[in-house]
Image (spheres, rainbow, N blue to C red):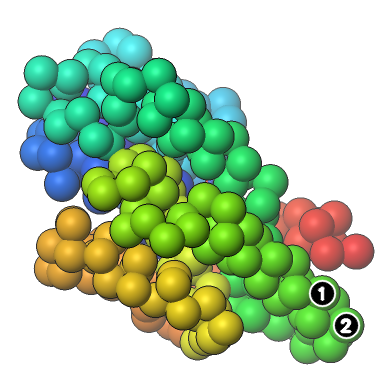
Amino acid sequence: MMELYLDLHSPPCRSVFLFAKAVGIPFEFKLVELATGQQYSEEFGKVSLMRKVPVMKDGSFILTESVAILKYLVQKHSSSVADHWYPADLQQRARVNEYLSWQHMNLRTHGSKVFLLRALFPVIMGSEVPKEKMDAAVEDLNQSLKMLEDYFLQNKPFIIGDKISLADLVAVVEIMQPVATGLDVFEGHPKLISWRERVKKAFGEKLFDESHEVIMKVSSLPHKMQNNSELEMLKPKFQKIFS
Ligand SMILES: N[C@@H](CCC(=O)N[C@@H](CS)C(=O)NCC(=O)O)C(=O)O
């Protein structure tokens, strides 16, 4: 059976998990606990030199990068996966790809930064986040949310139109990251509130909430990380990101 190496604290992992579950692709869940540094273990190093999740192992074929994994799954299961997830239509597919290309350096980058600053910075660095750093990160996130709303979504129910696609999936899991830290990211973005409800419904509330259960309990993450030697490995990484 296909194996997925995941930690559901991670948005790219949740996108792969949610998709496989929603379309009924069977897989074995292999937990790689990032908070305890399992991505640096010898065992995981044999699976992926990237030391990041998600990773898919389908037989002897190993694939990293959530977007590549999602597209692989769509193509592999094309007879059972509904077309709307990654439409065959040239322009609709291009629209999905446009979002998937854009999000890496925009919503993902800025959403993750706000998440890391609010949830982890104080524990790892042992100091509060400087106000101007936090304000700048939230401002960048807001600009990405505005672009999602005004450019990608406009007045449509979903990014490609009437139906959900990989683009909505990848967007919503990233937005849930700052949401989990208690930030009201939807303030000033009314269209995104109803869009999120439509996306949730499309997956089914139970599956959606189940996938987000661990991230919604993010306040327990620092506790897991404390007294853990792996924390020291994260310090230089954080210093590099946030200096
Ligand atoms: N572009 C990659 C991003 C993967 C990634 O950054 N994963 C993070 C979790 S969100 C990770 O495994 N980080 C572990 C580390 O950097 O030590 C994807 O979409 O799959």
Residue 75 sits in which quadrant? top left
Toward the viewer: 160 or 23? 160
Q: Is residue 167 left or right of residue 230?
A: left
Residue drawn at x 15%, y 32% is 82
Residue density around tag 1, few if under 14, some if 14–19, many if 20 or more, within 10 Å:
few
Q: Is residue 23 left or right of residue 189?
A: left
Location of residue 1 in the rendering, given as x and y in whole percent from the top left corner: 13, 25
Residue 47 can be seen in this image: no
Q: Is residue 128 above or below residue 89?
A: below
Marks 1/2 in contact by CB < 8 Å: the verdict is yes
Q: Is residue 2 above or below residue 189?
A: above
Residue 78 sits in which quadrant? top left
Q: Is mark 1 within 8 Å of ligand 1?
A: no
Residue 79 can be seen in this image: yes
Local SS, label 2: helix
Q: Amino acid at mark 2?
A: Glu
Residue drawn at x 79%, y 81% is 135
Location of residue 155 in the rendering, given as x and y in whole percent from the top left corner: 42, 61
Say which mark, if any, is on residue 132.
2
Q: Locate ligand 1 by image quadrant.
A: top right
Location of residue 203 in the rendering, given as x and y in whole percent from the top left corner: 18, 57
Residue density around tag 2, few if under 14, some if 14–19, many if 20 or more, within 10 Å:
few
Q: Quadrant of the C terminus?
A: bottom right
Residue drawn at x 37%, y 56% is 156
Location of residue 215 in the rendering, given as x and y in whole percent from the top left corner: 39, 71
Q: How many marks?
A: 2
Distance of label 1 from label 2 (alpha carbons): 6 Å
Q: Amino acid at mark 1?
A: Ala
Q: Which residue position is annotated with label 1?
A: 136
